[in-house]
Image: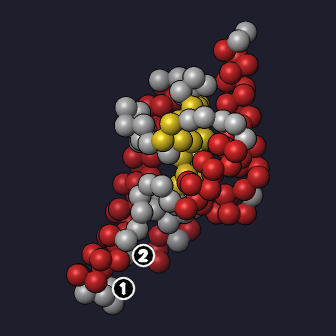
C-alpha cells in the first residue's frame, strides 16, 4: 500500500500528532486532581517517562494510544505497511522493556488504553485511585 501524500505532506501531518499532554491524558489528570490526588507528569528519570507518576505510592500510569502502542496488533498488522509494522513493533517492545524495568524498581504500572478511557472512564479513574490508596496503606503497615 503506497502513501497517497507527498513526503512533505506526510511530515506535516505527523508533526501535528501530540506525544504527550494529549486530550485523554489531560482528562484523566484533571479528574484525578479534582479528586484530591497529586502527581507528577512525564518524569524523565523513570523508564518510558510515565504520563502520570505518584512518587510516594510508587505508582505510574501510561495513557497509550491504540494505534501507536499496537493494541491487539497481531489482528490488524496485515493492514499496514512494513514501515508501520516495524515502528509499532518497536514501540511494543520498548513498552515491554520499560514495564519490566519499572517493576524491577518496585513501581506498580498501570497501562490504560485509549479505547478503555473513552468507553470506561470512571472505572479507569477508580483503578488508579485504588492502586494509589493500596500502595499508601501498605506503606503505613
Q: Nearer the viewer, residue 119 or 40?
A: 40
- Residue 21 in percent (x, y) is at 48, 55
Q: Are the two marked residues, 1 and 2, in contact with CB atoms closer than 8 angstroms?
A: yes
- Residue 71 in percent (x, y) is at 55, 60
Quadrant showing the N terminus? bottom left
User: Residue visible at 42% across and 37% down?
Assistant: 43
- Residue 7 in percent (x, y) is at 23, 81
- The image quadrant of residue 8 is bottom left
User: Residue visible at 68% across and 21% down?
Assistant: 136
- Residue 15 in percent (x, y) is at 32, 70
Does 62 appear above or below 85?
above
Q: Is 1 displayed left or right of 23 in the figure?
A: left
Q: Which residue is mark 1?
A: 1
Does 48 appear above or below 88?
above
Does 2 appear above or below 75?
below
User: Residue visible at 70% across and 17% down?
Assistant: 138
The answer for how far apart the CA atoms under marks 1 and 2 are is 8 Å
- The image quadrant of residue 54 is top right
Amino acid at each position: 500500500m503506497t502513501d497517497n501524500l507527498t513526503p512533505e505532506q506526510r511530515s506535516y501531518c505527523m508533526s501535528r500528532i501530540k506525544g504527550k499532554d494529549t486530550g485523554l491524558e489531560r482528562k484523566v489528570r484533571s479528574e484525578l486532581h479534582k479528586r484530591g490526588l497529586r502527581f507528577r507528569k512525564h518524569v524523565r528519570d523513570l523508564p518510558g517517562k510515565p504520563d502520570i507518576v505518584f512518587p510516594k505510592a510508587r505508582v505510574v500510569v501510561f495513557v497509550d494510544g491504540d494505534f501507536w502502542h499496537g493494541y491487539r496488533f497481531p489482528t490488524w498488522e496485515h493492514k499496514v505497511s512494513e514501515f508501520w509494522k516495524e515502528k509499532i513493533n518497536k514501540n511494543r517492545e520498548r513498552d515491554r522493556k520499560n514495564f519490566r524495568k519499572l517493576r524491577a524498581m518496585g513501581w506498580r504500572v498501570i497501562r490504560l488504553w485509549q479505547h478503555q478511557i473513552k468507553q470506561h472512564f470512571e472505572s479507569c479513574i477508580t483503578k488508579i485511585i485504588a492502586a494509589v490508596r493500596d500502595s499508601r496503606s501498605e506503606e503505613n503497615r
